[in-house]
Image (tube, grey):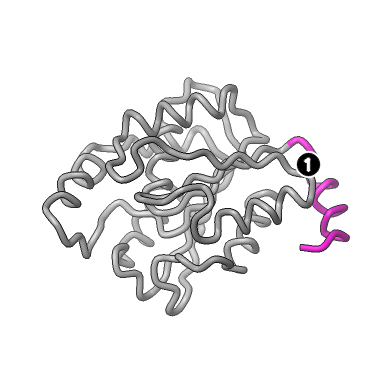
């Protein structure tokens, strides 16, 4: 992004905050997160990319509490971009918001409500609560303006049935990329393109 783009971003809304939430076993500097953070910071945005707690053994309560702590008072200038389990953390955080509070929206990259490819019993035990504990989608839908969900047709962990779930349960716009796996590359231009759509 080189900034006529800067001016474009300032015109859209200079006060927007973007929260980048990494995935299971990851961190704020992993994959494309640090690249995306630099892109938006270069255009004057406030970007927060926290280290989520106990990332090798993520727990719903701890991750939602961390989001609540870092976001503070959410508003329509608050946006989220999540990867994998980070998407679930965002959804479960939004579920806790009081009536009348709205955020701008979210981009979910390889988000899931079902999983495949878990190789060990430990992984299955860690994922269990995230897969089995219900999410109140109707409540979540009262708290945002726009969702976009991005998937790959060869993701080893996230079956494409999740595309339908995000469309039906959250009214999300969806996009499927070819041969992008679990979106672990260091730079993913389609994520930047979709993030711009969320923010506009």
The correct choice, above or below, for 152 with respect to 63 in the image is below
Query: Which residue occupies the extreme left position in the image?
Result: 121
Q: Position of residue 3 (x, y in %)?
A: 85, 59
**Left or right: where 159 falls relative to 30:** left
The residue shown at (37%, 39%) is 137
Q: Which residue is pictured at 26% across the width and 42% down the height?
A: 130
Residue 103 placement, left or right of 152 = right
Q: Which residues are magenta?
A: 1-15
Whole-percent x and y of residue 131? 23, 46
Q: Is residue 5 magenta?
A: yes
Please state the horizontal and vertical placement of residue 72, each as a whole percent of the image: 57, 23
Q: Residue at x 31, y 37 (%)?
A: 135
Determine which quarter of the picture holds residue 58: top left
**To which residue does mark 1 refer?**
13
| The one of 173 and 21 positioned closer to us in this rendering | 21
Residue toward you, 39 or 18: 39
**Residue depicted at x 57% and y 47%:** 146
Please check the rendered image and state whether residue 32 is part of the magenta-colored stretch, yes or no: no
56 over 70 or under it: above or below: below
Helix or strand or loop: what does disc 1 sit on? Answer: loop
């Amino acid at each position: 992004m080189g900034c006529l783009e800067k001016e474009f971003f300032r015109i859209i809304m200079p006060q927007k905050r973007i929260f980048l939430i990494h995935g299971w076993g990851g961190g704020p500097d992993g994959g494309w997160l640090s690249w995306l953070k630099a892109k938006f910071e270069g255009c004057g945005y406030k970007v927060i990319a926290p280290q989520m707690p106990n990332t090798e053994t993520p727990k719903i309560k701890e991750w939602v509490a961390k989001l609540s702590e870092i976001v503070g008072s959410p508003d329509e200038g608050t946006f989220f971009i999540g990867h994998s389990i980070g998407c679930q953390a965002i959804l479960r955080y939004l579920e806790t918001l009081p009536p009348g509070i709205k955020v701008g929206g979210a981009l979910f990259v390889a988000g899931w409500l079902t999983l495949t490819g878990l190789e060990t019993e430990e992984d299955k035990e860690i994922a269990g609560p995230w897969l089995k504990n219900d999410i109140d989608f109707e409540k979540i839908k009262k708290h945002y303006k726009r969702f976009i969900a991005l998937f790959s047709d060869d993701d080893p962990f996230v079956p494409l049935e999740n595309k339908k779930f995000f469309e039906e349960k959250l009214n999300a716009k969806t996009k499927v990329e070819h041969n992008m796996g679990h979106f672990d590359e260091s730079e993913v231009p389609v994520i930047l393109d979709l993030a711009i759509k969320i923010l506009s």
